[in-house]
Image (cartoon, grey):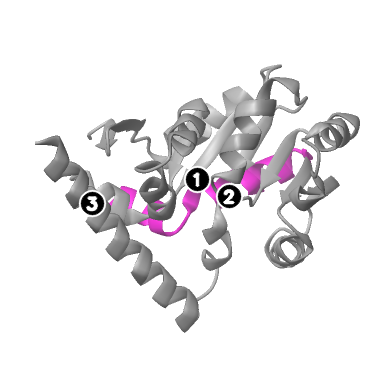
Amino acid sequence: MVKKIRLLGMEMDNFTLREEMAQSELFCHRQELNIIRTISIEILSMAADSQTVRDGLALADLLVVGDREILTEAGIYSPQRLREASEHGFMREFLNQMIAVHSSFFLVAKDQVQLDAFLEFLKIWYENITVAGYYLLDACSEGYDLMVNEINAAAPDIVLSVLASPFEDELLLQEKSRMRARVWYSLGKGYQNTEKKASFTVWFRQLVHKGRFKNVIHNYEENDE
């Protein structure tokens, strides 16, 4: 199996679900913060035009492919890998395993609306999760000190983020070394679509992102020739 994905001048590992889980288990035994990012076609499209997003992705310790189109554009057609990406297998395995060993979680969202949707999702699918606290990025009017202090005071095992790029990239590039947690796991914006049939609005938005992603890939390849 191809072990590296190369797109838009960036390189990432093409791990199987089992390999991703093995990596994440190592993170839970380290003292420093380890970053797991879910990579979507939307984020990769943004990375083509944003050095901040590219730097944020490079900072991650594990990149988990969250869209099958990323794999197919890289020439990877393994049915197992396509299924793992489209069904967000890593998210389910990781959250269930961490909940089973009684890990504590801290939630980070942009605003109250986003947080409420995230809490509802967790209540339905991960009802035994232990939430040690949460923070809304909109409250960071003068830097991230208050957020970092609240995370460190709660001392969670895992920070779960549903922030979008480039906000998350800016935050992590600036504050990674100050946060006392084992793992920062970015679920990305598509986490809600993993357990139910997507609405027409969500489906149409995904279609737009797929079209833009193909255009970004095409333009990059043309300019690179």
- Report whether residue 44 is seen: yes
Dominant SS in magenta: helix
Residue at screen point 38% across, 53% down:
41
Q: Which residue is mark 3?
A: 72
Q: Which residues are magenta?
A: 79-104
Q: Which element type, helix, strand or loop, lies under badge 3? A: helix
Give percent across and percent down for residue 111.
Answer: 75, 59
- Report whether residue 198 is seen: no
Which amino acid type is marked by label 2?
Answer: Leu
Q: Which residue is mark 2?
A: 187
Q: Name the one closer to the observer, 222 or 73.
A: 222
10 Å neighbourhood of mark 2: few (<14), some, or many (≥20)? Answer: many
Q: Which residue is mark 1?
A: 38
Q: CA distance from mark 2 to mark 1?
A: 6 Å
Question: Mark 2 touching mark 1, by CB under 8 A?
Answer: yes
10 Å neighbourhood of mark 3: few (<14), some, or many (≥20)? Answer: few
Q: Horizontally, is 7 left or right of 91 in the view?
A: left
Taking the magenta stretch, the answer to whether it contains residue 153 is no
Q: Which element type, helix, strand or loop, lies under badge 1? A: strand
Q: Residue furthest front?
A: 142
